[in-house]
Image (spheres, coloured by chain):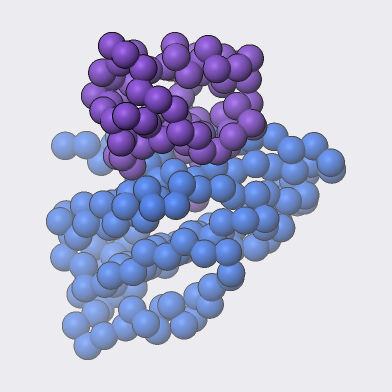
Chain colours: A blue, B purple
Amino acid sequence: MAVRVQTEDFDVGAESRALQAETVGGIALFIGTVRGLSSDDGVTAMTLEHFPGMTENELERIEAEARARWPLEDVTIIHRVGRLLPGEQIVMVGTASAHRKAAFESAEFIMDFLKTDAPFWKAEERGGEKTWVEARDSDDTARDRWSD
Amino acid sequence: MTLTIRYFAWMREHTGTDLETVPLPENVSSVGDLVPHLAAMSDGHAQALKNMRAVRVAVNRTYGDLDTPVAAGDEVAFFPPVTGG
């Protein structure tokens, strides 16, 4: 069990190896990165702010819900904060299970809830202009499809 | 008999503060009761709290809403819908 909020980058290879175990048959990794200059809106940098304390609580709650739904051997959630440039890694979710289906599905579940419940906010820079990113209804829709 | 109030993202920019301690006003027992008192603190506060439908609330770091009770010593946080990931 590991939830980390940090300014520094992370090593996906090392994180993947840390999820390996004799009982594990599949590891799913999702890595979110800053979409920037190659996209049509020309973001030059992004700054991520969060609510220390509540963020970790929410990520741990989401992890616990995933573990209650799927037989997971291990979970890693890492989210960076601070100023990031296009192409940099923002977030990693890693899930390890005996079989791939649980790993794939739980990684997607964790990302969907992270998007709507974990208190992070992105401000985008375009040239000298800073704008706060607005939440998208499609993220709520992605979360709500997990409701029974 | 005070409350700790926190603001994040554009709400922090509007209010000009990320953290303030305010006396618990009389007859305030929920977040909804508290909001008009905070909005009266400055033009920036009024601007930040103008549309509470666009704002999320956490009391003692757990999501709540306008009906969530507040009492002396509580931490009440206001922030826009989240945009991480």
Q: Position of residue A49 (x, y in %)?
A: 56, 48
- Extreme bottom residue here? A22
Which one is nearer the viewer's eye here, A58 or A139? A58
Above or below, A55 relative to A21:
above
- Extreme right residue here? A127
Relative side of A83 to B45, left or right:
right
The quadrant of the image that shows the N terminus of chain B is top left
The answer to which image quadrant residue A144 occupies is top left
- Extreme front residue here? B1
Res. A112 in view = no
Q: Position of residue A122 (x, y in %)?
A: 59, 43
Relative side of A65 to B25, left or right:
left
Q: Residue at x 44, y 52 (%)?
A: A52
Which one is nearer the viewer's eye here, A94 or A28? A94
Q: Position of residue A36 (x, y in %)?
A: 72, 50
Res. B48 in view = yes
Above or below, A27 relative to A111:
below
Q: How many numbered marks have been drawn onto this rendered protein structure?
A: 0
Q: Residue at x 44, y 27 (%)?
A: B22
Q: Position of residue A71 (x, y in %)?
A: 16, 65
Q: Residue at x 34, y 58 (%)?
A: A107
Above or below, B46 relative to A131:
above
Q: Residue at x 52, y 64 (%)?
A: A6
